[in-house]
Image (cartoon, helix red, strand yellow):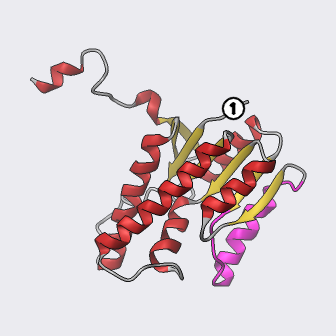
Amino acid sequence: MYKEMILVTGGARSGKSEFAERFVLHYGSKCAYIATAEIFDDEMAERVRLHQERRSPQRWNNYEAPYAAEQVMVEAGKEADAILFDCLTLYMSNLMYGKVAIAGTFEEKVTFVKGEIVKLLEAARKTEKLVVFVTNEVGGGIVPDNVMAREYRDLAGWINQQVADVCDRVFYCVAGQAVDLKKMAFSFDDEGAEQWKK
């Protein structure tokens, strides 16, 4: 059984969710989909509907986890052999600005969110199942013109690094194509890396 933790990242409409779903279906027979979105308007409801249409109820069990996702991860792991978590950046937004958000400085909020992500990752590893996380790359555009957007962009970048570091594989999606980043990544442990210190 395939038991790795995978991160799939990319921009909007990059094909990341479709790739993640195909990856889970390829390796899993009983699949769980953990959704983190909260529906506040018709546009978000339509996005959720389109996502749900792609998933056959014969292959997928759906879970909602806008908060306390580590508990839902444990529950999903009892039934499924492959789990899709979509997505980390929405979950991070819920933690940062939603009903469980803490009062305090930006640094205190970052510490809180990172701690919650650690709980989620620990729960995912303990399932001993394939777990695929979807996230968004939000730092590739211009610098946002307001503090909240800049803080969100920075936090998303830090969280993505935190998760990528512990995942077994990381895929970057662009134009519907997925690239296996960890196969291409430079490492200072590689033979010959000492030359870069000169």
Q: In the image, residue 16 lies at what x, y percent?
A: 59, 50
Total number of numbered discs in the rendering: 1
Q: Nearer the viewer, residue 73 or 194?
A: 73
The image quarter in which residue 164 lies: top left
Q: Residue furthest left?
A: 198
Queried whether the magenta region covers residue 40, the answer comes back as: yes
Residue 67 placement, left or right of 196: right
Q: Where the N terminus falls, by quadrant?
A: top right
Residue at image x 61%, y 63%?
A: 69
Residue at image x 65%, y 61%?
A: 71
Magenta region: which residues?
A: 35-57
Q: State whether residue 100 is above or below residue 82.
A: below
Q: State whether residue 180 is above or below residue 71.
A: above
Q: In the image, residue 163 lies at what x, y percent?
A: 46, 48
Q: Where the C terminus falls, by quadrant?
A: top left
Q: In the image, residue 81 lies at what x, y percent?
A: 76, 41
For the question of whether residue 15 can be seen, the reply is no
For the question of whether residue 71 can be seen, the reply is yes
Name the amino acid, label 1.
Tyr
Circle 1 residues within 10 Å: few <14, some 14–19, many ≥20: few
Q: State whether residue 186 is above or below residue 130.
A: above
Queried whether the magenta region covers residue 21, the answer comes back as: no
User: Secondary structure beneath disc 1?
Assistant: loop
The image quarter in which residue 178 lies: top right
Q: Nearer the viewer, residue 98 or 153?
A: 98
Q: Which residue matches tag 1?
A: 2
Q: State whether residue 142 is above or below residue 192.
A: below
Residue 91 placement, left or right of 79: left
Residue at image x 43%, y 52%?
A: 160
Q: Nearer the viewer, residue 4 or 58?
A: 4
